Amino acid sequence: MGIQVSNVCIDTNDLKRATEFWQAATGFSVSSADDSTVYFDASEKGTAAISLQLVPEQREGKNRLHLDFSTADLDGEVARLKELGATEVQAYDGWVVLKDLDGNEFCICAA
């Protein structure tokens, strides 16, 4: 029996704000939600889904896991995500590390 990634859950302290950011960032629609969790529908994109989970504690230290996104327009996507509120952490040749509104790091890589 094998396993596959079906969902990646991102912790947040502000579910509404995180939902708006990640929906705009990914283009995924919300498939279901309640007071503590939001699930995005990624079926149209053929990728693992993303969900958000409301947690009481603040993020501390470095992420032990992060998302990598790829794009044909690295500069354009980085600029767009920064307009949505992401902050740039570091840029390398062909990829950029960003933080979402809760400080969770993710990467945008040139396709």
Image: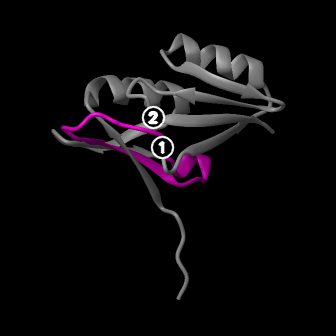
Q: Is residue 48 magenta?
A: yes
Q: Answer whether labels 2 and 1 touch (C-beta < 8 Å).
A: yes
Q: Which residues are magenta?
A: 42-63
Label 2 CA crowd tier, 10 Å (few <14, some 14–19, many 20+): many
Amino acid beneath label 2: Asn
The chosen color scheme is: one colour
Identify the residue shown where x is 56% and y is 47%.
44
> Is-magenta flag for residue 43?
yes
Q: Is residue 18 above or below residue 36?
A: above
Q: Which residue is denoted by mark 2 in the rendering? A: 104
| Residue 66 vertical position relative to residue 80 in the rendered view, above or below | below
Q: Residue at x 35, y 30 (%)?
A: 19
Mark in front: 2 vs 1? 1
Secondary element at image label 1:
loop
The residue lying at 49 percent from left, 24 percent from top is 24
Q: Nearer the viewer, residue 107 or 26?
A: 107
Residue furthest out toward the right: 93
Q: Position of residue 79 (x, y in %)?
A: 65, 14
What x and y, as percent, mark residue 29?
Answer: 43, 36
- Asked if residue 65 is positioned above or below residue 90 in the image, the reply reads below
Residue at the left extreme of this rendering: 35
Q: Quadrant of the C terminus?
A: top right
Q: Residues within 10 Å of mark 1 (few under 14, many from 20)?
A: few
Give the number of callouts. 2
Residue that numbered label 1 is attached to: 63
Q: Could you tell me residue 104's position as x and y percent? A: 45, 34
